[in-house]
Image (cartoon, rainbow, N blue to C red):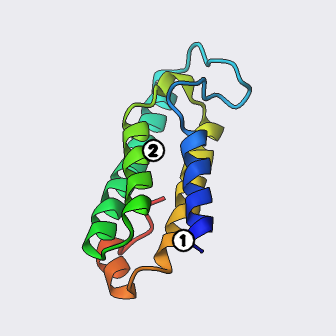
Amino acid sequence: MKDFIKHSMTALGNLVRSDSKCSSDGNQVSKKNDDTRKELALRIDSCSQTVSQVKKLLAENSIRSDIQEHFDTLQCTLDNLDIDKLNVSDVENIEGAINRALRAIAKFLPDSALEKSFTKRIH
């Protein structure tokens, strides 16, 4: 299970690496309408807030530091993404990868910790 989490986090980090073009077709999205840009920004912000909550939860439950470091890196990456280089499918991929990582780490956390932190579905 430890390897699965590490692999998931590595894949997620590669997916959202901020120093590369992030659009699915490999081309930078040159213009997008304001509403779409705002929606994508809100969705990435939600991902970032979720990762921030998970980091606190991991620390409170003494989860291994290398897993915490992966979430620190992910947080930094999400906070520095260029929304103008993303499209809807990119954000969907990021959200899906975060959800998979959350399901993987949930096995290591007591149910009560998860219930307190996530009383409703965020993504």
Which residue is tagged 1? 103
Of the two numbered discs 1 and 2 in the rendering, the one whose residue sits closer to the viewer = 1
Is 19 situated above or below 79? above
Crowdedness near tag 1: few (<14), some (14–19) or many (≥20) residues, C-alpha within 10 Å: few
| Residue 85 placement (x, y as % from top left) | 55, 23
Which residue is tagged 2? 43
Is 118 situated above or below 93? below
Residue at x 56%, y 14% (from the top left corner): 31
Identify the mark at residue 119; answer none if there is no mark: none
| Residue 9 placement (x, y as % from top left) | 54, 54
Label located before the other in sequence (1 or 2) = 2
The amino acid type found where label 1 is placed reads Arg
Q: Quick one: 67 or 94, which is closer to the camera?
A: 67
Residue at x 37%, y 72% (from the top left corner): 63
Residue at x 42%, y 60% (from the top left corner): 66
The amino acid type found where label 2 is placed reads Arg
Crowdedness near tag 2: few (<14), some (14–19) or many (≥20) residues, C-alpha within 10 Å: some
